[in-house]
Image (cartoon, helix red, strand yellow):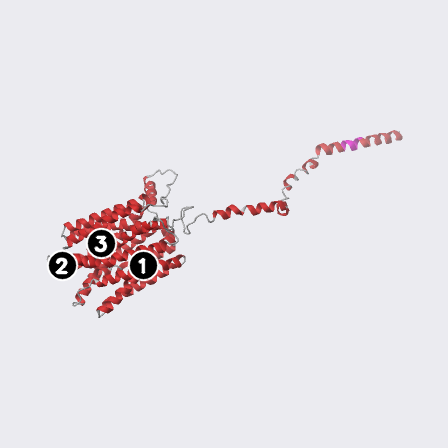
Amino acid sequence: MALKSSESEEAKGPRREADKEQQELVGNPQPESEPLPVPPMEPKPEPQPQTNPAALPELELEPEPVHESEPTPTVETRRTARGFQPPEGGFGWMVVFAATWCNGSIFGIQNSFGILYSMLLQEEREKNRQVEFQAAWVGALSMGMIFFCSPIVSIFTDRLGCRITATAGAAIAFIGLHTSSFTSSLSLRYFTYGILFGCGCSFAFQPSLVILGHYFQRRLGLANGVVSAGSSIFSISFPLLIKMLGAKIKLAQTFQVLSTFMFILTLLSLTYRPLLPSSQDTPSKRGVHTLCQCFLAQLRKYFNMRVFRQRTYRIWAFGIAAAALGYFVPYVHLMKYVEEEFLEIKQTWVLLVCIGATSGLGRLVSGRVSDSIPGLKKIYLQVISFLLLGLMSMMIPLCRGFGGLIVVCLFLGLCDGFFITIMAPIAFELVGPMQASQAIGYLLGMMALPMIAGPPIAGK
Protein backbone atom coordinates (compact mmCIF):
# COMPACT_ATOMS: atom_id res chain seq x y z
CA MET A 1 0.00 0.00 0.00
CA ALA A 2 2.79 2.29 0.79
CA LEU A 3 4.31 1.55 -2.54
CA LYS A 4 1.08 2.40 -4.37
CA SER A 5 0.67 5.65 -2.56
CA SER A 6 4.17 6.70 -3.39
CA GLU A 7 3.65 5.83 -7.06
CA SER A 8 0.38 7.71 -7.17
CA GLU A 9 2.02 10.78 -5.66
CA GLU A 10 4.83 10.56 -8.15
CA ALA A 11 2.32 10.33 -10.99
CA LYS A 12 0.33 13.23 -9.70
CA GLY A 13 3.45 15.34 -9.28
CA PRO A 14 4.11 16.02 -12.93
CA ARG A 15 0.39 16.59 -13.52
CA ARG A 16 0.30 19.25 -10.81
CA GLU A 17 3.37 20.93 -12.26
CA ALA A 18 1.80 20.93 -15.72
CA ASP A 19 -1.41 22.37 -14.29
CA LYS A 20 0.55 25.10 -12.56
CA GLU A 21 2.36 25.97 -15.76
CA GLN A 22 -0.94 26.17 -17.64
CA GLN A 23 -2.41 28.39 -14.92
CA GLU A 24 0.58 30.68 -15.08
CA LEU A 25 0.36 30.86 -18.85
CA VAL A 26 -3.41 31.53 -18.85
CA GLY A 27 -4.03 33.47 -15.66
CA ASN A 28 -0.91 35.51 -15.18
CA PRO A 29 -0.85 38.56 -17.57
CA GLN A 30 2.69 39.64 -16.71
CA PRO A 31 4.38 37.92 -19.65
CA GLU A 32 1.92 39.61 -22.01
CA SER A 33 2.21 43.06 -20.37
CA GLU A 34 6.00 43.12 -20.44
CA PRO A 35 6.33 43.70 -24.23
CA LEU A 36 3.68 46.47 -24.15
CA PRO A 37 5.91 49.24 -22.80
CA VAL A 38 8.63 48.35 -25.26
CA PRO A 39 7.11 50.11 -28.39
CA PRO A 40 6.81 53.58 -26.78
CA MET A 41 10.47 53.38 -25.80
CA GLU A 42 11.54 52.86 -29.42
CA PRO A 43 11.52 56.63 -30.46
CA LYS A 44 14.75 57.00 -28.44
CA PRO A 45 17.01 56.74 -31.49
CA GLU A 46 16.59 60.53 -32.03
CA PRO A 47 20.29 61.39 -31.86
CA GLN A 48 20.87 59.17 -34.91
CA PRO A 49 20.35 62.09 -37.45
CA GLN A 50 23.17 63.95 -35.70
CA THR A 51 25.61 61.11 -36.26
CA ASN A 52 24.31 60.32 -39.73
CA PRO A 53 26.60 62.07 -42.25
CA ALA A 54 23.97 61.85 -44.98
CA ALA A 55 21.79 64.41 -43.20
CA LEU A 56 24.51 67.06 -43.08
CA PRO A 57 24.14 68.33 -46.65
CA GLU A 58 20.38 68.62 -46.13
CA LEU A 59 20.96 70.96 -43.22
CA GLU A 60 23.23 73.10 -45.36
CA LEU A 61 20.60 73.39 -48.08
CA GLU A 62 17.76 74.49 -45.80
CA PRO A 63 19.01 78.05 -44.93
CA GLU A 64 19.23 78.99 -48.64
CA PRO A 65 15.56 80.10 -49.08
CA VAL A 66 15.79 81.99 -45.80
CA HIS A 67 18.72 84.05 -47.04
CA GLU A 68 17.01 84.67 -50.35
CA SER A 69 13.98 86.26 -48.71
CA GLU A 70 16.00 88.91 -46.86
CA PRO A 71 17.15 91.02 -49.83
CA THR A 72 13.73 90.89 -51.51
CA PRO A 73 12.65 94.42 -50.39
CA THR A 74 14.98 96.53 -52.49
CA VAL A 75 13.93 99.77 -50.79
CA GLU A 76 15.80 100.12 -47.54
CA THR A 77 12.95 101.64 -45.64
CA ARG A 78 10.13 100.21 -43.63
CA ARG A 79 6.71 99.30 -45.00
CA THR A 80 7.82 99.40 -48.64
CA ALA A 81 6.21 97.36 -51.35
CA ARG A 82 7.91 93.97 -51.75
CA GLY A 83 10.10 93.85 -54.84
CA PHE A 84 9.75 97.56 -55.67
CA GLN A 85 12.81 99.46 -56.84
CA PRO A 86 12.60 103.18 -57.70
CA PRO A 87 14.02 104.10 -61.12
CA GLU A 88 16.33 106.73 -59.57
CA GLY A 89 15.90 109.00 -62.58
CA GLY A 90 14.41 108.78 -66.06
CA PHE A 91 10.89 110.20 -66.09
CA GLY A 92 11.48 111.05 -62.44
CA TRP A 93 13.38 114.16 -63.47
CA MET A 94 10.26 115.44 -65.24
CA VAL A 95 8.43 114.88 -61.97
CA VAL A 96 11.22 116.81 -60.23
CA PHE A 97 10.63 119.75 -62.60
CA ALA A 98 6.89 119.70 -61.93
CA ALA A 99 7.52 119.55 -58.18
CA THR A 100 9.97 122.44 -58.53
CA TRP A 101 7.34 124.56 -60.24
CA CYS A 102 4.85 123.61 -57.54
CA ASN A 103 7.09 124.53 -54.61
CA GLY A 104 8.43 127.63 -56.33
CA SER A 105 5.12 129.13 -57.41
CA ILE A 106 3.32 128.37 -54.14
CA PHE A 107 5.96 129.51 -51.69
CA GLY A 108 7.23 132.23 -54.00
CA ILE A 109 3.81 133.90 -53.65
CA GLN A 110 3.47 133.02 -49.97
CA ASN A 111 6.91 134.27 -48.97
CA SER A 112 6.38 137.49 -50.95
CA PHE A 113 3.22 138.33 -49.06
CA GLY A 114 5.12 141.09 -47.28
CA ILE A 115 4.91 143.16 -50.48
CA LEU A 116 1.26 142.21 -51.01
CA TYR A 117 0.67 143.12 -47.37
CA SER A 118 1.99 146.64 -47.97
CA MET A 119 -0.26 146.97 -51.03
CA LEU A 120 -3.23 145.77 -48.97
CA LEU A 121 -2.51 148.37 -46.31
CA GLN A 122 -2.41 151.14 -48.89
CA GLU A 123 -5.86 150.19 -50.14
CA GLU A 124 -7.43 149.60 -46.74
CA ARG A 125 -6.01 152.63 -44.95
CA GLU A 126 -8.27 154.79 -47.08
CA LYS A 127 -11.17 153.08 -45.28
CA ASN A 128 -9.65 152.21 -41.92
CA ARG A 129 -6.55 153.64 -40.29
CA GLN A 130 -5.81 150.62 -38.12
CA VAL A 131 -5.83 147.63 -40.41
CA GLU A 132 -2.45 146.03 -39.68
CA PHE A 133 -3.96 143.31 -37.53
CA GLN A 134 -6.84 142.60 -39.93
CA ALA A 135 -4.68 142.59 -43.07
CA ALA A 136 -2.15 140.23 -41.50
CA TRP A 137 -4.86 137.59 -41.24
CA VAL A 138 -5.08 137.34 -45.05
CA GLY A 139 -1.56 136.01 -45.43
CA ALA A 140 -1.63 134.09 -42.16
CA LEU A 141 -4.78 132.23 -43.19
CA SER A 142 -3.31 131.38 -46.58
CA MET A 143 -0.08 129.96 -45.16
CA GLY A 144 -1.87 128.29 -42.27
CA MET A 145 -4.38 126.53 -44.50
CA ILE A 146 -1.52 124.89 -46.39
CA PHE A 147 -0.61 123.08 -43.19
CA PHE A 148 -4.08 122.84 -41.65
CA CYS A 149 -5.50 120.84 -44.58
CA SER A 150 -2.53 118.48 -44.74
CA PRO A 151 -4.11 115.57 -42.77
CA ILE A 152 -7.10 115.67 -45.13
CA VAL A 153 -4.81 115.95 -48.14
CA SER A 154 -2.95 112.83 -47.03
CA ILE A 155 -6.23 110.89 -47.08
CA PHE A 156 -7.03 112.07 -50.62
CA THR A 157 -3.47 111.28 -51.69
CA ASP A 158 -3.74 107.72 -50.38
CA ARG A 159 -7.20 107.11 -51.86
CA LEU A 160 -7.10 109.06 -55.14
CA GLY A 161 -3.38 109.23 -55.84
CA CYS A 162 -0.91 112.09 -56.20
CA ARG A 163 -1.96 113.07 -59.73
CA ILE A 164 -5.67 113.67 -59.10
CA THR A 165 -5.11 115.34 -55.74
CA ALA A 166 -2.44 117.73 -56.99
CA THR A 167 -4.31 118.65 -60.17
CA ALA A 168 -7.52 119.42 -58.30
CA GLY A 169 -5.61 121.43 -55.70
CA ALA A 170 -3.83 123.54 -58.33
CA ALA A 171 -7.19 124.24 -60.00
CA ILE A 172 -8.70 125.38 -56.68
CA ALA A 173 -5.68 127.60 -56.02
CA PHE A 174 -6.07 129.17 -59.46
CA ILE A 175 -9.75 129.91 -58.79
CA GLY A 176 -9.03 131.39 -55.36
CA LEU A 177 -6.20 133.62 -56.54
CA HIS A 178 -8.04 134.74 -59.66
CA THR A 179 -11.26 135.60 -57.83
CA SER A 180 -9.27 137.71 -55.35
CA SER A 181 -8.80 140.22 -58.15
CA PHE A 182 -12.55 140.84 -58.47
CA THR A 183 -13.07 142.13 -54.94
CA SER A 184 -11.61 144.91 -52.86
CA SER A 185 -13.23 143.79 -49.62
CA LEU A 186 -10.83 142.53 -46.97
CA SER A 187 -13.40 140.15 -45.53
CA LEU A 188 -13.98 138.51 -48.92
CA ARG A 189 -10.26 138.14 -49.42
CA TYR A 190 -10.15 136.17 -46.20
CA PHE A 191 -12.09 133.54 -48.12
CA THR A 192 -10.70 133.86 -51.67
CA TYR A 193 -7.01 134.35 -50.87
CA GLY A 194 -6.81 133.10 -47.30
CA ILE A 195 -8.96 129.96 -47.39
CA LEU A 196 -9.58 129.04 -51.03
CA PHE A 197 -6.10 129.77 -52.33
CA GLY A 198 -4.51 128.32 -49.18
CA CYS A 199 -6.48 125.05 -49.38
CA GLY A 200 -5.67 124.67 -53.06
CA CYS A 201 -1.98 125.16 -52.36
CA SER A 202 -2.16 122.49 -49.67
CA PHE A 203 -3.72 119.94 -52.03
CA ALA A 204 -1.11 120.76 -54.67
CA PHE A 205 1.93 120.95 -52.41
CA GLN A 206 1.86 117.76 -50.34
CA PRO A 207 1.64 115.31 -53.29
CA SER A 208 4.78 116.94 -54.69
CA LEU A 209 6.63 115.72 -51.60
CA VAL A 210 5.17 112.22 -51.70
CA ILE A 211 5.62 111.56 -55.42
CA LEU A 212 9.40 111.96 -55.21
CA GLY A 213 9.56 108.81 -53.06
CA HIS A 214 8.03 106.87 -55.95
CA TYR A 215 10.95 107.69 -58.25
CA PHE A 216 13.89 108.13 -55.89
CA GLN A 217 15.18 106.35 -52.80
CA ARG A 218 18.97 106.35 -52.83
CA ARG A 219 19.04 109.92 -54.20
CA LEU A 220 15.88 111.14 -52.50
CA GLY A 221 17.73 113.84 -50.58
CA LEU A 222 19.31 115.09 -53.80
CA ALA A 223 15.93 115.16 -55.55
CA ASN A 224 14.42 117.15 -52.68
CA GLY A 225 17.40 119.47 -52.77
CA VAL A 226 17.00 120.09 -56.50
CA VAL A 227 13.29 120.78 -56.04
CA SER A 228 13.91 123.15 -53.15
CA ALA A 229 16.85 124.89 -54.83
CA GLY A 230 14.95 125.29 -58.09
CA SER A 231 11.97 126.70 -56.27
CA SER A 232 14.24 129.26 -54.64
CA ILE A 233 14.64 130.86 -58.08
CA PHE A 234 10.95 131.71 -57.84
CA SER A 235 11.49 133.05 -54.32
CA ILE A 236 14.23 135.33 -55.63
CA SER A 237 12.30 136.59 -58.65
CA PHE A 238 8.81 136.91 -57.17
CA PRO A 239 9.55 139.89 -54.87
CA LEU A 240 10.98 141.81 -57.81
CA LEU A 241 8.08 140.75 -60.04
CA ILE A 242 5.41 141.72 -57.53
CA LYS A 243 7.14 145.03 -56.81
CA MET A 244 7.22 145.87 -60.51
CA LEU A 245 3.60 144.86 -60.97
CA GLY A 246 2.52 146.90 -57.97
CA ALA A 247 4.21 149.99 -59.37
CA LYS A 248 2.60 149.68 -62.83
CA ILE A 249 -0.74 148.00 -62.18
CA LYS A 250 -3.02 147.68 -59.21
CA LEU A 251 -3.30 144.85 -56.71
CA ALA A 252 -6.25 143.28 -58.52
CA GLN A 253 -4.31 142.85 -61.78
CA THR A 254 -1.35 141.54 -59.80
CA PHE A 255 -3.51 138.70 -58.51
CA GLN A 256 -4.50 137.89 -62.09
CA VAL A 257 -0.89 137.67 -63.24
CA LEU A 258 0.04 135.44 -60.30
CA SER A 259 -2.87 133.13 -61.00
CA THR A 260 -1.30 132.13 -64.31
CA PHE A 261 1.40 130.28 -62.37
CA MET A 262 -1.32 128.19 -60.73
CA PHE A 263 -2.83 127.43 -64.12
CA ILE A 264 0.50 126.12 -65.40
CA LEU A 265 0.83 124.09 -62.20
CA THR A 266 -2.50 122.42 -62.99
CA LEU A 267 -1.05 121.09 -66.23
CA LEU A 268 2.27 120.03 -64.74
CA SER A 269 0.56 118.09 -61.95
CA LEU A 270 -0.62 115.60 -64.55
CA THR A 271 2.93 114.21 -64.63
CA TYR A 272 2.58 112.77 -61.10
CA ARG A 273 2.26 109.16 -62.24
CA PRO A 274 2.41 106.98 -59.09
CA LEU A 275 4.57 103.83 -59.04
CA LEU A 276 3.97 102.54 -55.52
CA PRO A 277 0.66 100.80 -54.79
CA SER A 278 -1.95 102.63 -52.77
CA SER A 279 -1.54 102.25 -49.01
CA GLN A 280 -5.18 101.53 -48.38
CA ASP A 281 -5.88 99.61 -45.24
CA THR A 282 -7.66 96.34 -45.89
CA PRO A 283 -11.02 96.28 -44.08
CA SER A 284 -11.70 93.65 -41.46
CA LYS A 285 -13.31 90.44 -42.69
CA ARG A 286 -15.45 90.14 -39.64
CA GLY A 287 -18.97 91.42 -39.93
CA VAL A 288 -19.78 94.80 -38.46
CA HIS A 289 -23.07 94.53 -36.69
CA THR A 290 -23.53 97.91 -35.02
CA LEU A 291 -23.51 101.45 -36.37
CA CYS A 292 -20.79 102.45 -33.92
CA GLN A 293 -18.51 99.65 -35.06
CA CYS A 294 -19.13 100.58 -38.69
CA PHE A 295 -18.25 104.20 -37.99
CA LEU A 296 -15.06 103.25 -36.14
CA ALA A 297 -14.07 100.89 -38.94
CA GLN A 298 -14.43 103.64 -41.53
CA LEU A 299 -12.61 106.09 -39.26
CA ARG A 300 -9.64 103.74 -38.91
CA LYS A 301 -9.71 103.15 -42.64
CA TYR A 302 -9.28 106.80 -43.61
CA PHE A 303 -7.38 108.18 -40.60
CA ASN A 304 -4.31 106.04 -40.21
CA MET A 305 -3.00 106.79 -36.72
CA ARG A 306 -0.37 104.06 -36.70
CA VAL A 307 2.39 106.60 -37.31
CA PHE A 308 1.85 107.97 -33.81
CA ARG A 309 2.77 104.60 -32.30
CA GLN A 310 6.40 105.46 -32.92
CA ARG A 311 7.74 107.56 -30.10
CA THR A 312 10.42 109.11 -32.30
CA TYR A 313 7.81 110.41 -34.73
CA ARG A 314 5.67 111.81 -31.90
CA ILE A 315 8.57 113.73 -30.38
CA TRP A 316 9.69 115.01 -33.77
CA ALA A 317 6.23 116.08 -34.93
CA PHE A 318 5.16 117.83 -31.72
CA GLY A 319 8.54 119.55 -31.41
CA ILE A 320 8.43 120.99 -34.93
CA ALA A 321 4.80 122.08 -34.47
CA ALA A 322 5.58 123.92 -31.23
CA ALA A 323 8.50 125.76 -32.80
CA ALA A 324 6.47 126.87 -35.84
CA LEU A 325 4.82 129.76 -33.98
CA GLY A 326 7.34 132.31 -35.23
CA TYR A 327 8.31 130.70 -38.53
CA PHE A 328 6.16 132.85 -40.83
CA VAL A 329 6.49 136.11 -38.87
CA PRO A 330 9.52 137.52 -40.76
CA TYR A 331 7.90 136.93 -44.14
CA VAL A 332 4.83 138.98 -43.19
CA HIS A 333 6.21 141.87 -41.12
CA LEU A 334 9.76 142.30 -42.43
CA MET A 335 8.84 144.74 -45.22
CA LYS A 336 6.68 146.86 -42.96
CA TYR A 337 9.40 146.93 -40.28
CA VAL A 338 12.07 148.09 -42.75
CA GLU A 339 9.82 150.80 -44.17
CA GLU A 340 9.28 152.21 -40.67
CA GLU A 341 12.82 151.87 -39.31
CA PHE A 342 14.86 152.64 -42.46
CA LEU A 343 12.98 155.43 -44.17
CA GLU A 344 15.83 156.25 -46.54
CA ILE A 345 15.85 152.72 -48.00
CA LYS A 346 13.61 152.36 -51.04
CA GLN A 347 14.57 148.91 -52.31
CA THR A 348 13.31 146.93 -49.36
CA TRP A 349 12.52 143.93 -51.55
CA VAL A 350 16.25 143.18 -51.62
CA LEU A 351 15.87 141.49 -48.22
CA LEU A 352 13.40 138.96 -49.61
CA VAL A 353 15.74 138.32 -52.53
CA CYS A 354 18.57 137.63 -50.08
CA ILE A 355 16.39 135.21 -48.13
CA GLY A 356 15.35 133.40 -51.30
CA ALA A 357 18.92 133.17 -52.66
CA THR A 358 20.49 131.69 -49.56
CA SER A 359 17.44 129.51 -49.01
CA GLY A 360 18.02 127.95 -52.41
CA LEU A 361 21.69 127.41 -51.59
CA GLY A 362 20.78 125.83 -48.27
CA ARG A 363 18.21 123.54 -49.86
CA LEU A 364 20.63 122.31 -52.52
CA VAL A 365 23.45 121.72 -50.03
CA SER A 366 21.21 120.14 -47.39
CA GLY A 367 19.81 117.69 -49.94
CA ARG A 368 23.29 116.41 -50.69
CA VAL A 369 24.31 116.43 -47.03
CA SER A 370 21.20 114.55 -45.90
CA ASP A 371 22.04 111.68 -48.29
CA SER A 372 25.39 111.25 -46.54
CA ILE A 373 23.85 111.24 -43.04
CA PRO A 374 22.64 107.74 -42.17
CA GLY A 375 19.18 107.03 -40.83
CA LEU A 376 17.49 109.24 -38.29
CA LYS A 377 20.57 111.31 -37.57
CA LYS A 378 19.12 113.75 -40.10
CA ILE A 379 16.88 115.01 -37.28
CA TYR A 380 19.87 116.59 -35.53
CA LEU A 381 20.65 118.64 -38.64
CA GLN A 382 17.07 119.87 -38.84
CA VAL A 383 16.95 120.76 -35.15
CA ILE A 384 20.16 122.78 -35.41
CA SER A 385 18.91 124.63 -38.49
CA PHE A 386 15.59 125.45 -36.82
CA LEU A 387 17.36 126.68 -33.70
CA LEU A 388 19.53 129.03 -35.76
CA LEU A 389 16.43 130.13 -37.70
CA GLY A 390 14.82 131.28 -34.46
CA LEU A 391 17.97 133.11 -33.38
CA MET A 392 18.15 134.99 -36.69
CA SER A 393 14.50 136.03 -36.34
CA MET A 394 15.23 137.39 -32.87
CA MET A 395 18.20 139.40 -34.16
CA ILE A 396 16.16 141.32 -36.77
CA PRO A 397 14.93 144.02 -34.29
CA LEU A 398 18.46 144.37 -32.91
CA CYS A 399 19.98 145.45 -36.23
CA ARG A 400 20.78 149.16 -36.35
CA GLY A 401 22.02 149.27 -39.93
CA PHE A 402 20.60 148.00 -43.19
CA GLY A 403 23.83 146.13 -43.96
CA GLY A 404 23.57 144.16 -40.74
CA LEU A 405 19.95 143.35 -41.57
CA ILE A 406 21.04 141.96 -44.94
CA VAL A 407 23.56 139.66 -43.22
CA VAL A 408 20.86 138.40 -40.83
CA CYS A 409 18.49 137.73 -43.74
CA LEU A 410 21.19 135.79 -45.57
CA PHE A 411 21.65 133.44 -42.60
CA LEU A 412 17.88 133.33 -42.11
CA GLY A 413 17.34 132.02 -45.64
CA LEU A 414 20.18 129.51 -45.30
CA CYS A 415 18.67 128.01 -42.14
CA ASP A 416 15.23 128.00 -43.74
CA GLY A 417 16.55 126.00 -46.68
CA PHE A 418 18.04 123.34 -44.42
CA PHE A 419 14.86 123.09 -42.35
CA ILE A 420 12.44 122.69 -45.27
CA THR A 421 14.45 120.24 -47.36
CA ILE A 422 15.12 117.63 -44.66
CA MET A 423 11.46 117.36 -43.63
CA ALA A 424 10.39 114.82 -46.27
CA PRO A 425 13.50 112.56 -46.02
CA ILE A 426 13.05 112.38 -42.24
CA ALA A 427 9.42 111.32 -42.67
CA PHE A 428 10.46 108.60 -45.12
CA GLU A 429 13.11 107.38 -42.68
CA LEU A 430 10.65 107.26 -39.79
CA VAL A 431 7.67 105.48 -41.36
CA GLY A 432 8.70 104.47 -44.89
CA PRO A 433 7.24 105.58 -48.22
CA MET A 434 3.95 103.68 -47.75
CA GLN A 435 3.06 105.80 -44.69
CA ALA A 436 4.97 108.97 -45.58
CA SER A 437 1.88 110.77 -46.86
CA GLN A 438 0.09 110.34 -43.52
CA ALA A 439 3.20 111.27 -41.54
CA ILE A 440 3.81 114.47 -43.50
CA GLY A 441 0.12 115.34 -43.39
CA TYR A 442 -0.18 115.06 -39.63
CA LEU A 443 3.03 117.04 -39.12
CA LEU A 444 1.92 119.92 -41.33
CA GLY A 445 -1.54 119.83 -39.79
CA MET A 446 -0.09 120.29 -36.31
CA MET A 447 2.01 123.19 -37.59
CA ALA A 448 -1.09 125.00 -38.90
CA LEU A 449 -2.45 126.65 -35.76
CA PRO A 450 0.91 128.03 -34.56
CA MET A 451 1.66 129.40 -38.01
CA ILE A 452 -1.78 131.03 -38.33
CA ALA A 453 -1.56 132.64 -34.89
CA GLY A 454 2.05 133.80 -35.18
CA PRO A 455 1.86 136.78 -37.60
CA PRO A 456 -1.28 138.40 -36.10
CA ILE A 457 0.17 138.08 -32.59
CA ALA A 458 3.45 139.64 -33.72
CA GLY A 459 1.62 142.41 -35.59
CA LYS A 460 -0.59 143.25 -32.65
Report the residue at 28% width, 58% height from top. Answer: 324
**Over which residues does the magenta segment extend?**
15-20
Mostly what secondary structure, the magenta segment? Answer: helix
Find disc 3 in the rendering and name its residue: 141
Q: Taking 26 as reference, is 341 left or right?
A: left
Where the N terminus falls, by quadrant? top right
Q: Residue farthest to the front?
A: 90
Query: Is label 3 or label 1 in front?
Result: 1
Find disc 1 in the rendering and name its residue: 363
Place residue 26 in its image quadrant.
top right
* Residue 364 in picture, x, y percent from top left: 32, 59
Badge 2 element: helix
Name which of mark 1 and mark 2 comes first in the sequence. Answer: 2
Give yes or no for contact between labels 3 and 1 (Cβ–Cβ under 8 Å). Answer: no
Query: Is label 2 or label 3 in front?
Result: 2
Name which of mark 3 and mark 1 comes first in the sequence. Answer: 3
Q: Tell me the kind of residue under disc 3.
A: Leu
* Residue 303 in picture, x, y percent from top left: 33, 47
Find disc 2 in the rendering and name its residue: 122
Q: Tell me the kind of residue under disc 1.
A: Arg
Badge 3 element: helix
Where the C terminus falls, by quadrant? bottom left
Mark 2 vs mark 3, CA separation in Å: 20 Å
Instruction: Name the one closer to the observer, 203 or 48.
Output: 203
Determine if residue 409 is in view: yes
